[in-house]
């Protein structure tokens, strides 16, 4: 099987001690693989595109679809379209309750694209904002995020997310699930009628495609993280008008997309 | 609404410089909430049980089920049973393709329990092993896991998992998705007929319930991580016969369950 790249080179505006420099950075590849079992769409796995056969077999065993490799009659991949076809020895082996319905619906077409779930294409709309931040403000906000979570300090086991407008905290939540912390912010905004324009979303975890999609759904144009982004997340951020800032640690940070919102970037 | 605890106290056997000491540790709570939308089961969110209303509203908006809070006619929780009931203003608002079928099937009953997905109850079986490891061996294995992943060093964005028997590496994988890295190990074992007995599973991420379930599905009785566990993960590890070792960092580590497999624990 042809190997897909597990990382990608991206352009980044790296700030060190407030000084911007254009660099090339390597980020992890993020790749959706949609599984068909006995000709029915089963699930979409968002993964690092290596060892796809191991992952598919392991996933099917974990989900209880197969018990051993021999339960699979045929398994083949269409890498261009990001599809895996599984034929089971028993054609009636899969209980319908095991099928995931989170699928690419026909409204998105079946071609490769950033939006691999139908609901995302409907709910994640491009955001715009004339907001700008300095690298120093990014760093101070990230420090505050870390201070906010007593639960994290106690257990070391949760993700933190917060929404700010200028220096004012609008809300902050912790959760063991990355997306839950962001959903809590989204819910808070809807419950309390918070206008998301010109807000800044802070997140303790990696910038994956899901995190960028949640930022767009919330309506926040500035996404700050102390961690790494993926290539798919950055393509989505570019498309959705989101400034993605990663690796905010000490006196350094990387701006990956829509760099003009970070003050100092115009010195280039 | 009654508040649920966001953390739990657990007994832990803490090794410092190889010396064991029984301590009480605080771990993050992990709690499954099953959502019903218009009387149909929609999805199960595994979360930190705080701000459930925000999370539910945000999740429904993110999934495209609602656009604004006013689209919800009623929302109430049954905390004892871990259920949320959502009634939408429009009874026909949810396209069936949005419903997740990963649900608790009737075979598991509908009561609160560790196994919140039907497939887990069928595929995660208790493991047993007379394997023992010293704290020093745990540390060395964790060092090797970190050395294994070039992708992690390059991108800072992936999880690593490896399977060992004694000092021998059976396989190792990286993935941006926690579960994918473990599914790749599971698939490798099935593809190559690896006997999982007396194997050691190393993982770079947190010990969540899903990670413990994957270990049981793979058939590995020793789970080593440099990160924190959750309370639900530890209940499952107890039940499934898995020794969960967390926070393996420098000369320290914590043994949470089935401690007799870590040499030195008999000195107590």
Image (cartoon, coloured by chain):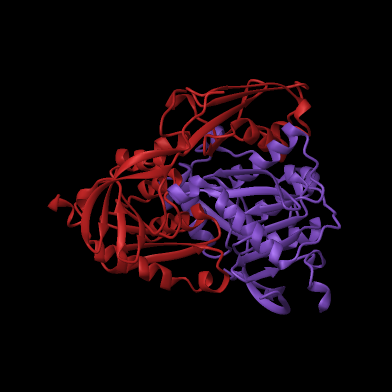
Chain colours: A red, B purple
What residue is at 45 percent from the left and 55 percent from the top?
A182
Toward which corner of the image does residue B204 lie, by quadrant? bottom right
| Residue B38 or residue B101, whichever sits in front | B101
Q: Position of residue A39 (x, y in %)?
A: 64, 20
The answer to whether any part of residue A125 appears in the image is: no
Q: Name the quarter where the C terminus of chain B is drawn.
A: bottom right
What residue is at 34 percent from the left and 66 percent from the top?
A250
Q: Residue furthest left?
A: A267
Up-down relation of residue A20 to residue B105 (above or below):
below
Q: Position of residue A61 (x, y in %)?
A: 72, 36
Up-down relation of residue A141 to residue B179 (above or below):
below
Judged left or right of residue A138, residue A172 is right
Q: Position of residue A45 (x, y in %)?
A: 56, 37
| Residue A214 or residue A27, whichever sits in front | A27
Judged left or right of residue B158, residue A223 is left
Q: Position of residue B169 (x, y in %)?
A: 69, 46
| Residue A63 or residue B172, whichever sits in front | B172
The answer to whether any part of residue B139 appears in the image is: yes
Q: Name the quarter where the N terminus of chain B is drawn.
A: bottom right
């Amino acid at each position: 099987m042809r190997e897909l790249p597990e990382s990608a080179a991206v352009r980044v505006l790296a700030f060190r001690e407030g000084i911007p420099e254009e660099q090339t950075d390597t980020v992890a590849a993020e790749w959706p693989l949609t599984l068909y079992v006995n000709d029915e769409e089963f699930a979409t796995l968002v993964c690092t595109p290596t060892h796809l056969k191991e992952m598919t077999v392991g996933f099917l065993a974990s989900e209880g679809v197969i018990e051993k490799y021999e339960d699979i009659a045929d398994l083949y991949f269409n890498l261009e379209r990001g599809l895996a076809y599984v034929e089971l020895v028993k054609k009636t082996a899969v209980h319908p309750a095991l099928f995931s319905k989170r699928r690419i619906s026909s409204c998105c077409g079946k071609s490769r694209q950033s939006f691999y779930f139908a609901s995302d294409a409907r709910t994640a709309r491009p955001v715009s904002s004339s907001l700008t931040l300095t690298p120093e403000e990014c760093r101070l906000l990230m420090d505050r995020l870390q201070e906010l979570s007593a639960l994290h300090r106690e257990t070391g086991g949760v993700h933190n997310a917060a929404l700010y407008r200028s220096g004012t905290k609008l809300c902050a939540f912790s959760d063991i699930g990355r997306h839950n912390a962001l959903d809590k912010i989204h819910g808070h905004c809807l419950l309390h009628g918070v206008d998301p324009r010109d807000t800044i979303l802070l997140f303790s975890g990696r910038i994956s495609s899901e995190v960028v999609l949640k930022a767009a759904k919330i309506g926040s144009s500035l996404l700050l993280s102390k961690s790494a982004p993926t290539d798919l997340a950055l393509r989505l951020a570019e498309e959705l008008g989101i400034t993605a800032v990663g690796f905010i640690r000490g006196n350094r940070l990387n701006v990956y997309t829509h760099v003009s919102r970070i003050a100092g970037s115009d010195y280039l």
